[in-house]
Amino acid sequence: MDSLINAAARALAAGDPLGALNRIALRNEPSALALRGIAMAQLGDFARAKSLLKRAARGFGTKEPMARARCIVAEAEIALVSRDLAWPARALDAARGILERHDDKANAAHARYLAARHSLLIGRLDDATRRLAGIDPAHLSPASRAAFEMVAAGIAMRRLHTSAAHTALANARRAATQARIPALMAEVDIMARALKTPAARKIAEGKTRLLLLEDVEALLSSKTLVVDACRNAVRRGSRIVSLARRPVLFALARALAEAWPGDAPRGTLLARAFHARHADDSHRARLRVEIGRLRAKLAPIADIRATDDGFALTPRGAAQIVVLAPPADEAHGAVLAFLSDGEAWSSSALALALGASQRTVQRSLDALAAADKVQTFGKGRARRWMTPPLPGFPTNLLLPVSRLGD
């Protein structure tokens, strides 16, 4: 490569896309196209960036497999940042294989990091952990090392391992400082603030208290019976009863937990579970059936007994029952949890990340837009949704995982 190409590459590595474009903006050979694409990505023009990288990859062709593979890795990173989560992962794996065979350890490690980050976004924590474990951080540049540590911190936060998250963020801060990229340092600081912001509410005996993420970790590892309204589950220590697919049963469990140590009247249970304003015999019969189903589900950790006015929840092997709720009972909270990262999401990407149908996600987005809580731009397949981060509304407990036990 000539001196201008080298200078442009150094400018991009230092986070100076305009400096890079000043040197190569009018050049159209594959290496210049690739650098221009990366520069446009750093400036936020993802559509132009993808077009330039595709042209560069075609220009390199099969005669320069390493350069072509690097273009594919850069295109995968743009897809990830622009929340194109349906981008073909096989192409990234194939590019990583080529880079590893040619001993390009730095770019191969970066490809692994991108795959880990993709898995983290869609809640596949085991897969993200496995992919991250295959990376030797010694092969990463300071900027890539900071990104690597932030993914490790994200996994730790989603698993409620706050000590590991603090350690990873400290490592990320050191790497970002070494890289001298202000935007990267700001991203680390934003992520670190989530550990210092209330992550949930603890509701017990009629009183509410805000909890940090480390407080949530301590609560869930204790012997307290927790009705978890962030994951729609009932748990005591390592025993977890998921009710994510049983909304009626979870509504009953939460109402019973909020009434503890007293009982929940039948009218309250009917209103919470069935939204029944005027209960009739069919409602009361259905309540008995659903209470029986809930009693069977919770048998290992709790019992439900009938009282004169309603039903009461009694823990087994626990001294207390509490409800763990989001910081605010926000409608469509799971969708807002993703949008609060400040990135622009498509409805299809949100559906993939949430594990929900695109129609369900679209209804939530329409409701949030009607309430002026999200913004949209673009049309058709280019339509994107976003919102600025909500103060005091960290997302970790609302983001889904591939299975509750992760």
Image (cartoon, grey):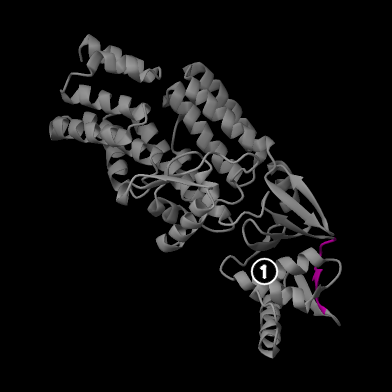
Tell me, yes or no, if residue 65 can be seen here: no
Is 312 one of the magenta-colored residues? yes
Is 201 one of the magenta-colored residues? no
Q: For this rendering, which residue is in front, 392 or 244? A: 392
State left or right for residue 394 relative to residue 266.
Answer: left
| Residue 375: % across, % down | 46, 45
Q: For this rendering, which residue is in front, 163 or 100? A: 163
- Count of numbered marks: 1
Q: Residue at x 72, y 65 (%)?
A: 254
| Residue 367: % across, % down | 51, 57
Tell me, yes or no, if residue 27 can be seen here: yes
Q: In which quadrant of the rendered image does the N terminus lie?
A: top left
Q: For this rendering, which residue is in front, 87 or 50? A: 50
State left or right for residue 275 relative to residue 338.
Answer: right
Q: Amino acid at mark 1?
A: Ala
Q: Residue at x 50, y 42 (%)?
A: 387
| Residue 84: % across, % down | 36, 45
State left or right for residue 38 relative to residue 231.
Answer: left
Above or below, 203 relative to 167:
below
Q: Residue at x 54, y 58 (%)?
A: 403
State left or right for residue 377 relative to residue 260.
Answer: left
Label 1 SS: helix
| Residue 264: % across, % down | 80, 73
**Crowdedness of circle 1 by 10 Å Cα count: few (<14), some, many (20+)?**
many
Specify the quadrant of the image occupied by residue 308: bottom right
Specify the quadrant of the image occupied by residue 62: top left
User: Looking at the magenta stretch, what is its main secondary structure?
Assistant: strand
Question: What residue is shown with label 1?
Answer: 251
Span shown in magenta: 310-319
